[in-house]
Image (cartoon, rainbow, N blue to C red):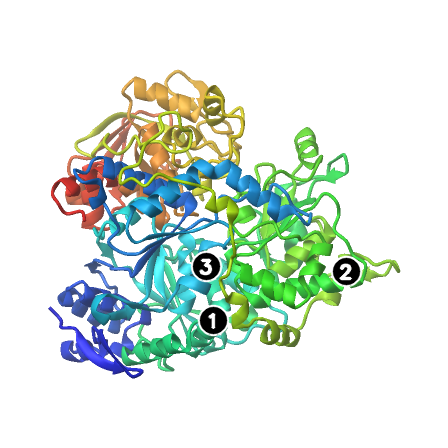
Amino acid sequence: MTAVSSTQLEGRRVELYDLPAFAANRGFDLGAVPYSGRVLLESLLRSGDPATAATLGKRLAAGEDPDVEMVFQPARILVQDYTGIPLLVDLAALRDRAAVPGRINPALPVDVVVDHSVQTDFAGRPDAIVRNEALELDRNRERYAFLKWAEGAFDGLRVIPPGRGIVHQVNLEQLATVVARGPGDLFFPDTVIGTDSHTTMVNGLGVLGWGVGGLEAESLILGLAQPLRVPPVVGVRLTGTAPPGTTPTDVVLALTERLRHENVRGLMLEFTGPSVGALSAPDRCTIANMAPEYGAMSAYFPVDQETLDYLLRTGRHDADVALVAAYYRHQRLWREDEEPAFGRVIEFDLSRVGPNLAGPSRPDQRISLSELPTSFAALSPGAPRSDSGVTDGDLVIASITSCTSTSNPKAMLAAGLLARRAVRLGLSVPAHVKTSLAPGSRAVTRYLKDAGLLQDLEKLGFHLVGYGCMTCNGGSGPLNEGVGQAVDRAGLTVAAVLSGNRNFEARVHAQVRAGYLASPALVVALALVGHVRADLAREPLGTGPDLRPVFLADLWPTDAELRALEAEFVTPGVFADAPGPQPGWDAVTAPDTDAFSWDPDSTYIRPPAYADAARPIRGPLTGARALLALGDDVSTDHISPVGAISADSPAGRFLKERGVRAFNSYGSRRGNHEVMARGTFSNPRLTNHLLAEGPSGGDTLHLPSGERLPVYEAARRYTDAGTPLIVLAGRSYGMGSSRDWAAKGPWLLGVRAVVAESFERIHRANLCAMGILPLLLPEGHGWRDLGLTGHETFDLGLDQVRESGRAEVVADGRSFTVRADVRSAGEWDVLLAGGMLPHLLTRLAAGDVR
């Protein structure tokens, strides 16, 4: 056991695990260890495992693959309401099964930020935010009452009410301390595990953390950390200087394209090189935010003077910031000129980045401004069609939204300045474009208002609609009046542009096929054009009253203008968290009880069906059928949609049968497994190759009857017949968010294994946490390459799968070998228990759970 050291920092005696002393004692060069690796070393020392710390330190210092399994101890857990409510439903179910319900409590601090439920029902009008927030409370009163019960019932759990901001931006501006304090004046790096994939955003402040599914978070919350196999740490070496006029969004979209190409899936990235110091903390956070989009586990920027400056600019106390500096310097966690050792380094030249967008359906589909029309034409070839003034390629949603960009003052001030110039030149936004402004925190509107730019954005229709994910999360609300009807009548292909991080098909809106990611300023520019058929680099955005064409270059602000505005208006005062009275939230009441009182008639909060009914992976799986046969890049939005519930879907019919008229969204119904099971694989843009090519509309082919049925109904037939199910898939299965419902839903449908070419990191772990076995096809082969159609009967030899990591599959006489994509002993333990909740119940019975 390594001893805790006492030392003097900033005039106070503190306790810490001394990293430099440990490295010197164990004979490795701490300066050669990547900074994120040094944070892992401290966690190992704090968890009482110096032997593993020494092994890890030596391997990282030598630039080797870590190849160790460790327990990572975060300082805190961060969740949002869409993932947090089902997590708390699971914990409430565990309390039901505990002899003393109050004994089930968090072992470390948990913050729940309510930011996903507000929707953009109203936009383009001064009272939009008031109306949207009122609707939010009306729709979600039962869910919010459950949150209030949880806040009172669980020790160490804090709920940050709706209307305060997006979880990751709140984390940056309010919650992150960079140095955490434990019992007995023990100080250690602030680290965080979150139930949202974009938890990595705080990596930009030197706070190591990443996203996990709610099930894995439940284990951490209860003090039962799951072993982590440390992945390789890859250095991303930044050189050069971004050209004038380049936005942080341009940089991160270019990086996303490059890093996807470099295949950094599941790896820890660390930014290094001479240009890191020139990036502002908000720029670093924008880059770190999109780690899930380029596939990385984390995207770390070491702490330096810019980190301290950001903490001071956002209103942190001088003494706290001074302690951060002293601690990080003492522990050699402070960024130095000498670069650490990396087994692999990716060079990226910022000087080669220019204005760009990404789309029409993936964040890594980077295009230049001139390539926008060609990009859309590839999706919608032929002559544009029209109906009632709406045309193929028209922009129907333009949203400044998401923590990715709204956390960045430079990006937001640029949008405001562009809007000011557009207004002065007499430009306006066409009526078919639904415009919205949904910043990630109140600070944004404060500095935009102080700078006089908010009113210019409002004159173009970018009125404040709320403080939450909104359009970025699919809560975009209805299209402008008449637009949706025209789209449906003529089958039009229309577009959306947002300053967010994801644009998977149908994620933003079910009627929108083309989605583009862009900087906030480009969102305003495209809104002025009103369509995506134009070359923004060469064609005018519109004409002024004098009939002279106005080009993008006429409106684009200079870097000097942005720096001056930021220095004058982005000050500590605007970050003061003073929300004032919240009568709607305050009026929500909840009982003060240790155990939750379940309402048997509730359509929002139900005891989970998967708590006790474990299906452990033991022995062969015979006579299985493929519920679906899918291609590449299937996202968690395809598997478990988050947006509106249609009336004619199995979930909509289920709710109608129970007298529900306002369906709300799938995201808001995650506390009810009956709704979520019926919504699984119901995304209208999902292509199921068991049926004819093209979107299958949530249907599948039931075998052997040959009937086309909704996925849920087909699954029920298979279950009634005792037929186990698998899913066939291609590359990057489960890309996107951390939602564990993309694993819970298939489990409820009877899926026992997913056989794919590759899995995205979080979803793979979520499958394990639900007792669904992730299996990799033979390397370099897709399921169709093996001659499969998905119509076969499958036998999976899983008898020795844990011991060998492999299993033989026989499909109608054709055999091939698959490999289990299970990364740690802890994941195997959960899988063989039948899932995380059965595993936790076993640990509860053994007295291991606090």
Out of 456 and 351, give the one closest to the viewer: 456
**Looking at the image, residue 313 lies above or below residue 161:** below
1 or 2: tag closer to the N-terminus: 1
Question: On screen, 215 above or below 580?
Answer: above
Contact (CB < 8 A) between labels 3 and 1? Answer: no
Label 3 sits on residue: 170
The percent coordinates of residue 391 (x first, y second) are 73, 40
How many numbered markers are drawn? Answer: 3
Compared to 161, does 562 lie above or below? below
Q: Residue 820 has which mark? A: none
Structural crowding at the residue carrying mark 2, measured as other residues with C-alpha within 10 Å and reported as few (<14), some (14–19) or many (≥20): some
* 3 vs 1, front mark: 1
Residue at image point 40% right, 62% down: 175
- Residue 463 position within the rendered picture, expressed as x and y whole percent measured from the top left: 66, 52
Residue 830 image point, x, y percent: 21, 42
Q: Which residue is mark 2?
A: 423
Q: Amino acid at mark 2?
A: Val
Residue under circle 1? Answer: 315
Residue 347 as seen in the image, left or right of residue 388: left
Q: Amino acid at mark 1?
A: Gly
Q: Amino acid at mark 3?
A: Val
Task: Decide which of 759, 806 is in the foreground and name it.
Answer: 759
**660 left or right of 50?**
right
Instruction: Determine whether, in the image, residue 667 is placed left or right of residue 750.
Output: right
Secondary structure at numbered mark 1: loop
**How far is disc 2 from disc 3 in space, using C-alphas?**
32 Å
